[in-house]
Amino acid sequence: MLHIGPYRFNSRLLLGTGKFTDFNTQKEAVKISETEILTFAVRRMNIFEPTQPNFLEKIDVQNYTLLPNTAGANNAEEAVRIANLAKASGLCDMVKVEIIGCPQTLLPDPVETLRATEMLLEQGFIVLPYTSDDVLLAKRLQDLGCHAIMPGASPIGSGMGIVNPLNLSFIIEQAKVPVIVDAGIGSAVDAAQAMELGADAVLLNTAVSGAKDPVKMASAMKHAIIAGRESFEAGRIAKKTYATASSPLEGISK
Ligand SMILES: CC(=O)[C@@H](O)[C@H](O)COP(=O)(O)O
């Protein structure tokens, strides 16, 4: 079971809701993924304008925990403002801090992310900062008291998978809060790898919404995350340079 602050989840898949070609595909993908947490950019919701189109309109949002993110914020103050807007509209008291520092790589701004996390924690939010795979930054965020750490596997939407598994495993090793690998997942094997490294969950969007068959990919991601977690818990065999026979002959009388 995944624990984030006071919340408990059976699914370890967090699904982004953007970039689907149509609302029916989005709905089917969300359903088959069996995710319990949906994430979205607050700035894309017309939260105070019920007459305007709502991109979650096909989804029965009562059945999900909503994780608004602060995408679009350029600094800590803007992120805090966006988080409060989401909270005031009754969406959730959890927030994913997303403060992009570079328009080309979409990598997060570490200083502003740290500041926003501190400010939001002071205001009583359940805070999940999206961060790079910087090991010490992850520790600093954890020391502030954030409720989960969300290191990127690779740049958002790149589909490059985990570019630095070593950094990720260092982050996981030292973590006292859930580690949710967020962004850059390209296919099911990447999601399984994150879980095998010991991540607590995976957040992804583009790999599903941009797949040739998004619904099938959502299903694949669900299974990959379950398989990766089971494999992690089962404990993999040690890697060796040379072969070991599968049917050893030692001890067998001739
Ligand atoms: C939807 C969301 O929160 C994204 O910002 C997230 O980082 C997903 O990234 P990918 O699209 O690379 O999976």
Image: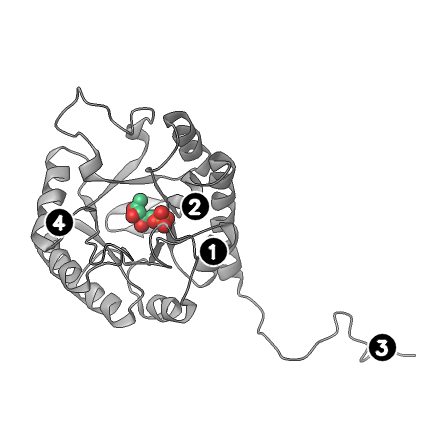
Q: Earlier in the sequence, mark 1 or mark 4?
A: 4
**Amino acid type, mark 3:** Ile
Identify the secondary structure beneath mark 2. Answer: helix
Q: CA gap, disc 1 to disc 2?
A: 10 Å
Whether residue 91 appears in this view of the structure is yes
Q: Nearer the viewer, mark 3 or mark 4?
A: 4
Q: CA gap, disc 1 to disc 3?
A: 42 Å
In this picture, residue 68 sits left or right of residue 193: left
Give the crowd class for mark 4: few <14, some 14-19, many >=20 residues within 10 Å. Answer: many
Question: Looking at the image, which is closer to me, 237 or 203?
Answer: 203
Residue at label 2?
Answer: 207
**Amino acid type, mark 1:** Asp
Q: CA gap, disc 3 to disc 2?
A: 51 Å
Give the crowd class for mark 2: few <14, some 14-19, many >=20 residues within 10 Å. Answer: many
Residue at label 4?
Answer: 79
Q: Horizontal and vertical percent for residue 108?
A: 23, 58
**Amino acid type, mark 2:** Ala
Question: Looking at the image, which is closer to me, 183 or 140?
Answer: 183
Residue at image position (78%, 70%) is 247
Q: Horizontal and vertical percent for residue 168?
A: 37, 66
Answer whether labels 3 and 4 touch (C-beta < 8 Å).
no
Corner quadrant of residue 181: bottom left
Question: Looking at the image, which is closer to me, 242 or 76?
Answer: 76
Residue at label 3?
Answer: 252
Corner quadrant of residue 199: bottom left
The label on residue 190 is: 1
Q: Earlier in the sequence, mark 3 or mark 4?
A: 4
**Amino acid type, mark 4:** Ala
Q: Nearer the viewer, mark 3 or mark 2?
A: 2
Answer whether labels 1 and 2 touch (C-beta < 8 Å).
yes
